[in-house]
Amino acid sequence: MGANSKIISAKILEIARQRGPSKTFCPSEVARALFPSNWRSKMEAVRNSAFQLAAKGKVRILQGGAEVPEPEQVKGAIRIQIVL
């Protein structure tokens, strides 16, 4: 895990904890917070970090309000939710 992915994972968990278990958020919030001038180019890295955290059971990846069984195969918009 590179330095950027550690920073990204930490930011995902920070935002997820702030929102709490009843709220979700878009990965773009993480990208915009960490990389304001080029956030779009960092979206894949943010999604990958979210998928890694989901594999460890720290967050859930949702699409259309439902948890996705295999997050890495999801196309399109996702939401992230903390797991307590």
Image (spheres, rainbow, N blue to C red):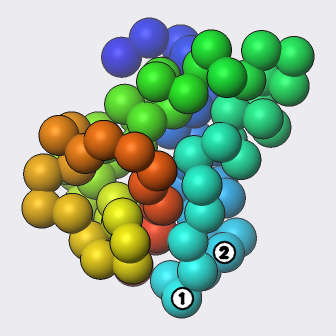
Q: Are marks 2 and 1 in contact (CB under 8 Å)?
A: yes
Image quadrant where residue 11 sits? top right
- Secondary structure at badge 2 equals helix
Which quarter of the rendered picture does the C terminus lie within?
bottom left
Image quadrant where residue 24 sits? bottom right
Residue marked by disc 1:
22
Badge 1 crowding class, 10 Å Cα cut-off, few under 14, some 14 to 19, many 20 or more, is: few
- Secondary structure at badge 1 equals loop
State the mark number for residue 65: none
Residue at x 36%, y 17% (from the top left corner): 1
Inspect the image, locate mark 2, and give the three-letter code of the amino acid beneath it. Arg
**x%, y% of residue 23?**
58, 80
Residue at x 44%, y 54% (from the top left corner): 78
Relative height, residue 57 to residue 48 (above, below): below
Residue at x 48%, y 61% (from the top left corner): 79
**x%, y% of residue 16?**
58, 64
**x%, y% of residue 82?**
46, 69
Q: Is residue 7 left or right of residue 47?
A: right
Q: Is residue 81 left or right of residue 12?
A: left
Relative height, residue 9 to residue 63 (above, below): above
One can see residue 58 in this view: no
Residue marked by disc 2:
19
Name the one closer to the observer, 64 or 12. 64
Total marks shown come to 2
Inspect the image, locate mark 1, and give the three-letter code of the amino acid beneath it. Ser
Residue at x 21%, y 39% (from the top left corner): 72
Relative height, residue 78 to residue 82 (above, below): above
Q: Is residue 33 left or right of residue 52?
A: right
